[in-house]
Image (cartoon, helix red, strand yellow):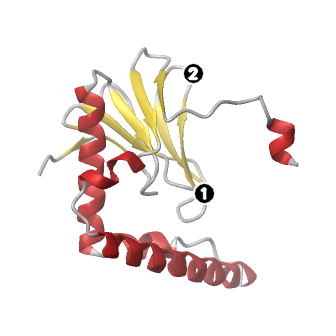
Amino acid sequence: MLAQMLQGQFEVHREWVHRTARGERLLVLHGDQFDGALPCPGWLTRLGDALHGANVMMSHRVNNLRRVFGRPYWPIAERVKLSIGASLRYIEQFERLAAHHARAQGYDGVVCGHIHRANLCHIEGTLYGNTGDWVESCTALAESECGELSLLRWPGTAHARLRPAAPVVADAA
């Protein structure tokens, strides 16, 4: 029913260019197009997907219990993912590849999702933004009226901000 109500009201694009209020040109894409370019055997990808699904389900159940006892949301799935060295290396390679892809096409930066690790930084002078997700990290990217990008974490306020005067720089290593 929702699909019928929204039919014709929006378009889906593989890639899109967003111009910020400051005039920066950002390439917006999902990010799955980089999967084949990153070194990871297919069986490991499938295993990771299965474990990720189980991890998210466990996180959901644990956080339901935490809510009953008045405890705040705790992103268990995200913490587990970031504690595994191979996962961290894959994420870092993905971030560098996405930033390089945008820079090679003449964009000021890239905004994507896919790996669900919320981040907002500069990689070798190119803006890299990952929206994260609403399941694990409860994050989103937002742009202010003056063109400042922020990484928002729900519930709460801006998690990270990028201003022209103080860019965050990620190592290329």
Residue 24, above or below 100: above
Q: State the residue position of label 1.
A: 134
As measured in the structure, the alpha-carbon distance from the residue carrying label 1 to the one carrying label 2 is 23 Å
> Viewed as shown, does residue 132 lie left or right of 42?
right
Q: Earlier in the sequence, mark 1 or mark 2?
A: 1
> Which quarter of the figure has residue 66?
bottom right
Q: Amino acid at mark 1?
A: Trp
Is residue 166 visible from the viewing direction of this image?
A: no
Residue 69, above or below 74: below
Secondary structure of residue under mark 1: loop
The mark total stands at: 2
Residue 139 percent coordinates (x, y): 55, 52
In-front residue for pair 138/28: 28
For label 1, count other residues whose C-alpha is less than 10 Å away and answer few (under 14), some (14-19) or many (20+).
Answer: few
Residue at horizontal 32 percent and vertical 48 percent from the top: 34
Q: State the residue position of label 2.
A: 145
Q: Amino acid at mark 2?
A: Glu
Residue 156 percent coordinates (x, y): 60, 53
Residue at horizontal 53 percent and vertical 75 percent from the top: 53
> Viewed as shown, does residue 66 lie left or right of 31?
right
Is residue 172 visible from the viewing direction of this image?
A: yes
